[in-house]
Amino acid sequence: MDLNFNQHLVKGYTSPSQIIRVLSENWVAEQGYCPNCSSQPLAEFGNNKPVADFYCAHCSEQFELKSKKAKLSNIINDGAYDTMLELIASDNNPSFFFLTYSKELAVNNFLIIPKHFFTATIIIKRKPLSATARRAGWVGCNIDLRQVPEAGKVFLVKNQTVMPRDKVTQQFKQTLFLRKQSNLARGWTLDVWQCIDKLNEKFNLQQVYAFAEELKLKHPDNNHIQDKIRQQLQILRDKGIIEFLGRGRYQKLR
């Protein structure tokens, strides 16, 4: 995988944003591959596709690309808030590629967050634009990557190191069970999973119970938080995310 952008493509371009769009989209089309089935190259949608940039002709996975100079941040700017909520609630929402690049126009990081990790929890509403703005009243959103479990951040390139393709597809496929859950059930699984991420490799049930108040804030209509925690731990155990060691003790699996 060549991490350098093909700068010959943008001779004559003057707009920085247009230059990066052309370079990054070309790089993904030429060097990227489908994390679901490993097929390469990815196909590009036409400019009239409103919610995705690429798709896999083999398995039909869809992808939207977000590119940024320098470091990968936890907060990613996105489009309209209401549109984003409608998108993640639909059946054909894309997964998101996030790409960061250096001042030398080479890829630093390239990762995918599969679409089943997108819930309303990670979409942060921005303040409406002021009355003097060209789009007065428009409400945008940010994507909060801190709310995504580490297993949902699948790196194809990390700190300019290309990850083994088989490891990428393995990590991607391990979480596909989330797509079979309802939005509510998936939200619970992801919320408990995120709590586990904050614990050591080995942990116990009481440590997860300590997040009960935090989970109650996210699910105010549920009065059986500890029961839900145990249910989600069983799901994560059955899917090979954690291992039950007995007597309320667990271990994360890598």
Image: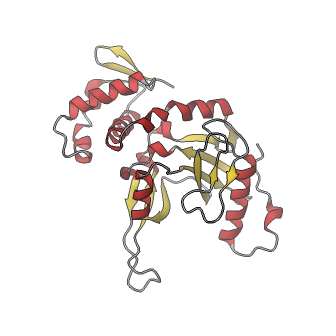
Q: In which quarter of the image is residue 191?
A: top left
Query: Considering only vertical position in the picture, is 36 above or below 24?
Result: above
Residue 237 drawn at (x, y percent): 39, 23
Q: In which quarter of the image is residue 45?
A: bottom right
| Numbered circles on residues, count | 0
Residue 143 drawn at (x, y percent): 45, 56
In the foreground, 199 or 33? 33
At x 77%, y 52%, the residue is 4
Q: In this view, does 202 lie to the left or right of 253?
A: left
Visible residue check, residue 207: no
In the foreground, 29 or 147? 29
Q: In this view, does 225 lie to the left or right of 192?
A: left
At x 55%, y 35%, the residue is 172
At x 27%, y 31%, the residue is 229
* Quarter in which the N terminus is drawn: top right
Question: Which residue is the extreme one toward the top?
Answer: 246
Query: Considering only vertical position in the picture, is 50 above or below 232?
Result: below
Q: In this view, does 55 lie to the left or right of 87?
A: right
Residue 145 drawn at (x, y percent): 46, 49
